[in-house]
Image (tube, grey):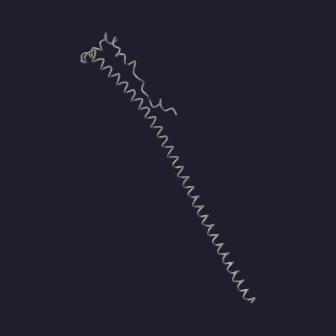
């Protein structure tokens, strides 16, 4: 009977050894999967960092372009205001000429006579000319 209990003990030891070997192999595979997953995540982190850097650079370029466009728009707005003012002044001059002189060609040239030149305030418009806005005035960063 000793031989049957010895065989069964050897058989149990053999099963235990195989199970331990199988468990070790399973643990090794699990560690390898975890390591691969970690490596994949680290690669993804690097890729996302690169994308983030590119996006930030793009945002900076866009912000600079926006600032330039805003400055250009400010200049254009100032020029529009100046041109509107000039147009209004020219319309006032035309109204004055039409009301006082009936708008005839001869009457318009009579304004250049020396005696009427000094007495006519519209002839002094050169003193009231608006100052043109330049790009240098608006670029103060």
Give the total of numbered labels: 0
Q: Where is 133 relative to 68, above or below?
A: above
- The residue depicted at 60 percent of the width and 66 percent of the height is 33
- Foreground: 123 or 38? 38
- Foreground: 19 or 2? 2
- Foreground: 36 or 108? 36
Q: Where is 128 relative to 64, above or below?
A: above
- Foreground: 80 or 19? 19
Find the residue positioned furthest to the top. 115
Q: Where is 25 relative to 51, above or below?
A: below
The reply, left or right, for residue 98 in relation to residue 27 is left
Task: Tell me where residue 126 appears, x and y as whole percent.
Answer: 38, 19
Quadrant showing the N terminus:
bottom right
The reply, left or right, for residue 20 in relation to residue 71 is right
- The residue depicted at 54 percent of the width and 50 percent of the height is 52
- The residue depicted at 47 percent of the width and 39 percent of the height is 66
- The residue depicted at 29 percent of the width and 14 percent of the height is 111
Find the residue positioned furthest to the right. 2
Task: Tell me where residue 81 appears, x and y as whole percent.
Answer: 40, 28
Task: Tell me where residue 100 appears, x and y as whole percent.
Answer: 28, 15
Q: Where is 37 relative to 56, above or below?
A: below
Task: Tell me where residue 103 appears, x and y as whole percent.
Answer: 25, 18
The reply, left or right, for residue 67 in relation to residue 4 is left
The image quadrant that residue 8 belongs to is: bottom right
């Amino acid at each position: 009977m000793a031989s049957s209990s010895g065989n069964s003990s050897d058989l149990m030891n053999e099963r235990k050894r195989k199970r331990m070997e199988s468990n070790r192999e399973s643990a090794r595979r699990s560690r390898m999967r975890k390591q691969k997953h970690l490596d994949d995540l680290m690669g993804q982190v690097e890729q996302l960092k690169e994308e983030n850097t590119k996006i930030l650079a793009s945002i900076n370029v866009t912000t600079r372009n926006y600032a330039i466009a805003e400055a250009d728009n400010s200049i254009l707005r100032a020029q529009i205001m100046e041109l509107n003012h000039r147009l209004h002044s020219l319309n006032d001059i035309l109204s004055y000429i039409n009301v006082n002189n009936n708008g005839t060609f001869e009457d318009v040239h009579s304004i250049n006579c020396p005696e009427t030149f000094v007495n006519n305030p519209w002839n002094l418009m050169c003193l009231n000319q608006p100052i043109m806005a330049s790009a240098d005035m608006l670029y103060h960063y």
